[in-house]
Image (spheres, rainbow, N blue to C red):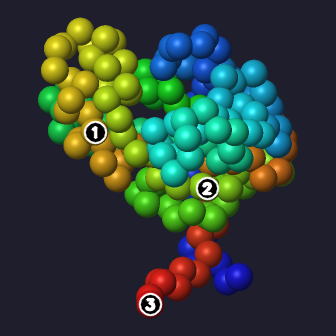
Amino acid sequence: MAIQYQLNGTVSGLYLGLQAGMHITTPLAQVRATFAGFDGDLHAGLPRKSDGRTSIYRRGTLIRNERQVTIVSNVELALIAAEMGITEIRPEWIGTNLLIDGIPNLTRLPPRARLFFASGAALLVTGENKPCTVAGKAIEQQVGQPGLADKFPKAALHRRGLTAAVERPGMIRVGDEVTAEVYEQIPYTV
């Protein structure tokens, strides 16, 4: 597998979802990445229950958890906020676990790209995190401006960030360098 791109960025924020039913995450200086996800996060676990994103299964079916970690970029959050007509969107408002700066077009990293951290921890990108009105409602509550929930999905399309699974455990700290490796992509054709 040949590396097509190797990109360097910085961990600018780490967050855990600690309260069930809340879309808000709590900032931390470091997290322990385990095979189940970020230790202590509500979305950690090897299996998860299927939901609206996995409609091929009956809702609630246990499936592999490929959504252990959600990743966003400050640049993309600023673009979303501008399109929505607000001054900012904070990562913790939309359930973020990891904020990365310095990697251009973060949301466009393809599945199977890997993110490597100083401790040796590694995340495997599983896909683009599709925007939804649940995150939009969280933004609407934080900003106090009715109507934002419905604007978020369009403004955040292809900018909402990524989902990933922990491929190699280790500590991740704010300020750490992160290296993204994107492997040669061969377009699928029939």
Q: CA distance from mark 1 to mark 2?
A: 21 Å
Up-down: is 51 above or below 103? Answer: above
Residue at 71% x, 82% y: name it. Answer: 1
Residue at 61% x, 20% y: name it. Answer: 17
Task: Tell whether label 3 touches label 2 (CB within 8 Å).
Answer: no
Q: Secondary structure at mark 1?
A: helix
Q: CA distance from mark 2 to mark 3?
A: 25 Å
Residue at 65% x, 29% y: name it. Answer: 43
Q: Position of residue 89 (x, y in %)?
A: 34, 27
Foreground: 110 or 130?
A: 130
Instruction: Read off the residue under disc 3.
Output: 190
Q: Amino acid at mark 2?
A: Val
Q: Along the polypeptide, which appears first: circle 2 or circle 3?
A: 2
Foreground: 6 or 98?
A: 98
Q: Which disc number belongs to residue 153?
A: 1
Q: Along the polypeptide, which appears first: circle 1 or circle 3?
A: 1
Foreground: 141 or 132?
A: 132
Up-down: is 36 above or below 17? Answer: below
Q: Position of residue 74 (x, y in %)?
A: 42, 39
State left or right for residue 40 relative to residue 85.
right
Q: Is residue 178 visible?
A: no
Q: Position of residue 160 (x, y in %)?
A: 39, 43
Q: Between label 1 and label 3, give the one nearer the viewer.
A: 3
State left or right for residue 179 relative to residue 101.
right
Q: Secondary structure at mark 3?
A: loop
Could you tell me how many numbered marks the image carries? 3
Q: Secondary structure at mark 2?
A: strand
Q: Between label 2 and label 3, give the one nearer the viewer.
A: 3
